[in-house]
Image (cartoon, grey):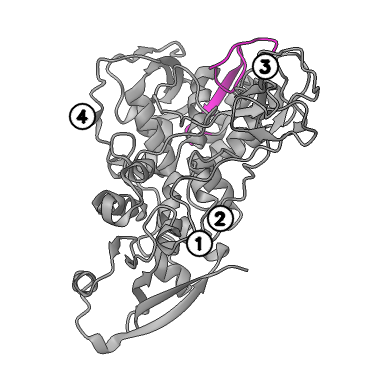
Amino acid sequence: MATISLKASVDKKSNRVLFVESDEFFVDILFSFLTMPMGTIIHLISNLSPTNGFVCMNNLYKSVENIDAIYFRTEACKQMLLHPHNAAAAYCKSLKLKIDDIDTSSFFCCESSNCTDSRYKLWSHYKNLYCGCGRPMSRNLNLSCRAPSNSGSDARNRGVFVEGLTRFVVSDYFQVMPASISASIALLTKLGVMDISNIEERIFDIGVTEVLELLERSLVSRTPLTEVLLARKEVPELRNEDSLQRISLIHEILDHQSERTGETSVRLVVCKSKKVVCYAEASKDFVDLLFSFLTIPLGYLMNEKHGGKSEGCIHHLYDSVINLDAMKYLKSNDIKEILLNPKIAPGSGYKNQPLGVKEAVDNQQYYYDPRNSTDAIRTTSFCPRGFLLTLLTMMDPKSPYKEGTEGDGFLLDPAMFTVSDDLVVTPISPVSELSLLEKLKIPFNDIYVCEVQVGREEASRLLAASFVSESALTDTFIRKMPKDALISDVLKE
């Protein structure tokens, strides 16, 4: 089993990792965290710790698992939310340790080699979608994706995101710096370590399990290296009354106060005395937005324009990428852009998504030779004998062929849903809603209903709240109620 060796400086007195010294392999893996969709992260760390502290994100993930497939536009919609693809998968597959267990190498096309839709041949990552001709896409394709241009055999090309042969210092709180004595002394001074006799050198060999533990701890803790390498775990409290301040949203940067595009309305049932949202009644448009959070990369949340800083220290990793000289320590400025502004995988987005999150573009063109029994894919437009090849086109996995409506979300109209304050999503049920009020011990005369509009600003607050809060609806809409909220005491006696 593959491992990575880390040389660590440990403070014997406090039993704490001060920093580790590493090559590009470990730093590549740390930087890959920023490219991972939230649904993938929740899936991976829930195997380690079912109660990992991400209440709302966990609830969204479990809601997708529990909602019947008949509510989704295609079977692939549910699969792509539970196992979202990474737009940077072509890079991450070259990491020394493979931490993402999602298979991105499977491709499928129409089961018929003589597909009646001869204009092009559709392909998909998801089996049993329906081709334009109406047949299921169940035939395996041998689709060979070209490796990124930064791969190679010489020593300097062995890194994925960072240059090969580069040494780095990584602090306990995930600040990454080029290795130097000045960087090490600066870290020790910042940590208040003055007695060098208390410092000892130790070697740790880490594998996939330890890397996943580091990912988990970096989201909730300020000392992930100590907690994983020295097995000294101290689980922090993620929620308190000032959680909205911890979200630290920077709304001024959005500059979309008057831009109300991609809006949807949501009906909130609010407890007047407690000033909390009991639950929301929402159409599929609002739930599409919530479920889309699972496809969004972690680095997108760390960008202050879209989200905010986490309770843990993952934002230090993001800031480290900002501060690194791309021409000296990273493969290119394009790599820096991939890490700082990661996109969602092709086919994962939908039109009118309030956040306006962008999809990555696959610039490769694939062609299909129907005479080749192995379904070989060529990168030229003609066979050697002059026969025309058929252009392969990726199918929108959210589009049932009979409807022919591309670009819509994950769920079917006119389905309605109940969304709890901590983002448990269920098909709407008045009986269940009454039971929820009973569970919360809230009488009818203590509630009112208000309708709010959800545009880009509200969607941004909701995304950040879903990452750090246990009451995302309250933190998004009540603690900063939109000015245009339409309040009507329709249930007032």
x%, y% of residue 252?
Answer: 20, 29
Q: Which residue is mark 2?
A: 99
- Residue under the image location 39 percent in, 59 percent down: 221
Q: Nearer the viewer, residue 386 or 343?
A: 386
Q: Which residue is mark 4?
A: 252
Q: Amino acid at mark 1?
A: Val
Neighbourhood count class around disc 3 (C-alpha, 10 Å): few under 14, some 14–19, many 20 upward: some
Find the distance from the CA under tag 3 to the CA under tag 2.
32 Å
Q: Residue furthest front?
A: 385
Q: Earlier in the sequence, mark 4 or mark 1?
A: 1
Find the distance from the CA under tag 1 to the CA under tag 2.
8 Å
Q: From the viewer's perspective, is residue 373 above or below residue 23?
A: above
Q: Amino acid at mark 3?
A: Pro
Q: Nearer the viewer, mark 4 or mark 2?
A: 2
- Residue 273 in view here: no
Magenta stretch, residue numbers? 400-423
Q: Nearer the viewer, residue 174 or 402?
A: 402
Q: Nearer the viewer, residue 145 or 285?
A: 145
x%, y% of residue 243?
Answer: 33, 43
Q: Which residue is mark 3?
A: 400
Q: Where is residue 396, by image quadrant?
A: top right
Q: From the viewer's perspective, is residue 132 above or below residue 21?
A: above
Q: Earlier in the sequence, mark 3 or mark 2?
A: 2
Q: Which residue is mark 1?
A: 211
Find the distance from the CA under tag 4 to the CA under tag 3.
40 Å
Q: Earlier in the sequence, mark 1 or mark 2?
A: 2
* Quadrant that contains the C terminus: top left
